[in-house]
C-alpha cells in the first residue's frame, strides 16, 4: 500500500477523532489521524469536565491512566445577581466512587494522553497537518488534501472530526453557512492559587473536586453563563456568551470575564491567585437545528463538527458526545470494511447508531431548551428576582419577616406579571422537566 493510502483518514485529534482512530487501529485498520496543532490538545480548550462513563467502555478504568486533575463529587449551580448569588450545591457519595461521574481535566494533557493511546494501538498521528479539502471521485469522498508535501491522502473512509466550524463538512456540502445565534463564545482563565487555598476555600479533601455553573446577567448585559472548575492546585474559570448577544450589546467578553471575577461570590476564591493562561473557543449550541447531514459516500462527520453538543442551561456536555460519536463512526467504518462497501448507504449506519445512543436522543430530548436559552428574562430577570426575594426574606432589620408569597408578589410586580412568569415556567418545564 502506498504510504499516502490509508483505510481511514480521521481529521482532528480532539476526543471525537482520537476515539475513532483508536478503535479503528485496534481492529488492525490502517488509520491516520491528522491534527493541525503542534500536539493534540494544543489548540483545544473547554470548561473542564469530562463525563467519562463512555470512555470507561473504551479504556476500562481510564481514571487509573488518564491525567486528570480531580474527580467531581460536588456540582453547584449558581444564579448571579449584581452583588448577591444563590446556589444549589449538590454532593454525592456515588460520584466519589469508580466509575465516577466526571473528572476535571486540562485538554493539553488529556488530549495528548488519549492520542497516545491511539498511537499505541497503531494509528499514525500526523501533527501540524491541516486538512484543507476533501478529494472526491464522483459522489464518493476518497481522501483529503493535507497542507504538506505530497499532501494528497487517500482512503476508503474519511471521518471529519475537525471541531466547531468544520471546514470539511462544508467542503463536502454537508452543512449550510452558520448564523451567529448558533454559537456561543467561551473564554477561560486558569488561576494558580496559594498552596492549600483551594481545599480551604471550597471545603475539598484529597482528589475531590467541584464544578460550579453560573447563570445571570453577565457584564455588559451579555446573555450566557460562567463556570468554575477545580484543578489540582488552580482554578479554571470562564464566561460563555451567546454570539448574537455579543453583537447586539456591542460588549466584549473580556469585560464580562473581568466583571465575573470581581463578583462578591467569586472574588474571594481568587484572592492571592496568579494568572496562568487564557484561551477562547466557540461552542456550537443550536442543538438539533445545526446538526448537518452526518454522512455521504465515504465520509462521516463527528463531534463538534456535527454540532453534537448538549448545551441545555444546566448541561454543557460535548466531550462525552464527541467520544460516543467517534465510537459510532469507527463502528460504522469497521462494518463497512467487513462488507466491502463504503457508499452512502453503508455510511448511513452511522446516523442509525447515533439515534440509538444518548447522542441524538439527548439532543432531541432537550431541543426545546434552545429557544428557552434565548429568553432574555432567564438572564435579565429571574436570577436577580430570586436573589432579591431571598435577600428580603432573610434580612433581619427589626421590621419583622413578611410571608414569602406576599413578598414574591410584590417583587414580581416590579419586574413582570404573574402571567408572564407562568408562561416562562411552562417553557422551562417543557424544556427541562417533562
Ligand atoms: C468554553 C467551553 C467550555 C466547555 N466546557 C465543556 C465541559 O466542561 N465538558 C464537556 O464535556 N464539554 C465542554 N465543552 C465542549 C467540548 O469542548 C467540545 O464539545 C469537544 O471538545 C468536542 O470534541 P471534538 O473532538 O468534536 O472537537 P475538538 O475538541 O474541537 O477537536 C477538534 C480538533 O480538530 C483539529 N482541527 C480542526 N480543523 C482541522 C483541520 N482542518 N485539519 C486538521 N486538524 C484540524 C483541532 O485543532 C482540534 O484538535 C466546552 C466548550 C467550550 C468552548
Image (cartoon, grey):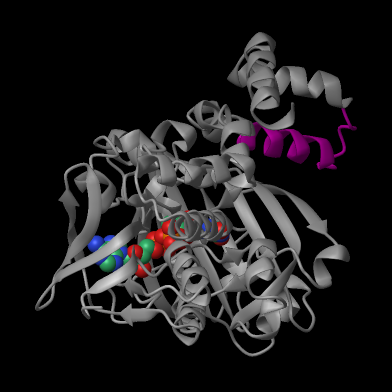
Residue at 59% x, 43% y: name it: 81
Q: Which residues are magenta?
A: 383-402
Magenta span contains residue 388:
yes
Rendered-image quadrant of the C terminus: top right
In front: 197, or 95? 95
Picture layout, residue 387 above or below residue 113: above
Picture layout, residue 276 above or below residue 97: below
Q: Main secondary structure of the magenta part?
A: helix
Q: Is residue 263 visible?
A: no
Q: Which residue appears farthest toward the bottom when viewing the image?
A: 195
Q: Is residue 222 visible?
A: yes
Residue 172: image location, x then y, percent: 23, 45
Q: On the rendering, which quadrant does ligand 1 occupy?
A: bottom left
Quarter assignment of residue 352: top right
Residue at 84% x, 72% y: name it: 97
* Horizontal side, residue 186 vs residue 431: left or right: left
Residue at 53% x, 58% y: name it: 331
Magenta span contains residue 194:
no
Residue 163: image location, x then y, percent: 36, 57
Residue 255: image location, x then y, percent: 36, 54
Amino acid at each position: 500500500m502506498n504510504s499516502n493510502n490509508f483505510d481511514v483518514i480521521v481529521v482532528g485529534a480532539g476526543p471525537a477523532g482520537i476515539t475513532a482512530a483508536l478503535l479503528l487501529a485496534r481492529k488492525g485498520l490502517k488509520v491516520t489521524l491528522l491534527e493541525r496543532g503542534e500536539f493534540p490538545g494544543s489548540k483545544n480548550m473547554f470548561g473542564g469536565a469530562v463525563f467519562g462513563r463512555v470512555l470507561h467502555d473504551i479504556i476500562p478504568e481510564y481514571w487509573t491512566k488518564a491525567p486528570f486533575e480531580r474527580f467531581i463529587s460536588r456540582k453547584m449551580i449558581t444564579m448571579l445577581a449584581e452583588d448577591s448569588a444563590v446556589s444549589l450545591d449538590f454532593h454525592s457519595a456515588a460520584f466519589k466512587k469508580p466509575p465516577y461521574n466526571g473528572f476535571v481535566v486540562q485538554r493539553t494533557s488529556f488530549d495528548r494522553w488519549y492520542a497516545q493511546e491511539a498511537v499505541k494501538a497503531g494509528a499514525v498521528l500526523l501533527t501540524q497537518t491541516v486538512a484543507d479539502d476533501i478529494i472526491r471521485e464522483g459522489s464518493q469522498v476518497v481522501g483529503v488534501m493535507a497542507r504538506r508535501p505530497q499532501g494528497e491522502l487517500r482512503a476508503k473512509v474519511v471521518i471529519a472530526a475537525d471541531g466547531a466550524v468544520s471546514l470539511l463538512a462544508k467542503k463536502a456540502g454537508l452543512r449550510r453557512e452558520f448564523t451567529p445565534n448558533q454559537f456561543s463564545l467561551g473564554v477561560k482563565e486558569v488561576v494558580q492559587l496559594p498552596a492549600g487555598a483551594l481545599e480551604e476555600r471550597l471545603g475539598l479533601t484529597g482528589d475531590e473536586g467541584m464544578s460550579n455553573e453560573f447563570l445571570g446577567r453577565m457584564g455588559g448585559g451579555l446573555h450566557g453563563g460562567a463556570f468554575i472548575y477545580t484543578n489540582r492546585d488552580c482554578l479554571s474559570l470562564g464566561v460563555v456568551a451567546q454570539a448574537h448577544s455579543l453583537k447586539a450589546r456591542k460588549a466584549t467578553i473580556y469585560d464580562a470575564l473581568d466583571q465575573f471575577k470581581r463578583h462578591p461570590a467569586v472574588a474571594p476564591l481568587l484572592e492571592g491567585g496568579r494568572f496562568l493562561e487564557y484561551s477562547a473557543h466557540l461552542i456550537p449550541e443550536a442543538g438539533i437545528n445545526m446538526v448537518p447531514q452526518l454522512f455521504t459516500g465515504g465520509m462521516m462527520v463527528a463531534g463538534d463538527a456535527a454540532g453534537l453538543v448538549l448545551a441545555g442551561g444546566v448541561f454543557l456536555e460535548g466531550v462525552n458526545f464527541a467520544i460516543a460519536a467517534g465510537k459510532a463512526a469507527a463502528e460504522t467504518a469497521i462494518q463497512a470494511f467487513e462488507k466491502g462497501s463504503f457508499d452512502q448507504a453503508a455510511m448511513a449506519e452511522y446516523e442509525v447508531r447515533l439515534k440509538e445512543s444518548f447522542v441524538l436522543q439527548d439532543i432531541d430530548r432537550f431541543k426545546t431548551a434552545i429557544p428557552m436559552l434565548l429568553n432574555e428574562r432567564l438572564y435579565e430577570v429571574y436570577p436577580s428576582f430570586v436573589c432579591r426575594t431571598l435577600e428580603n426574606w432573610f434580612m433581619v432589620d427589626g421590621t419583622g419577616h413578611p410571608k414569602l408569597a406576599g413578598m414574591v408578589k410584590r417583587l414580581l410586580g416590579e419586574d413582570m406579571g404573574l402571567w408572564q412568569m407562568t408562561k416562562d415556567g411552562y417553557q422551562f418545564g417543557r424544556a427541562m422537566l417533562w
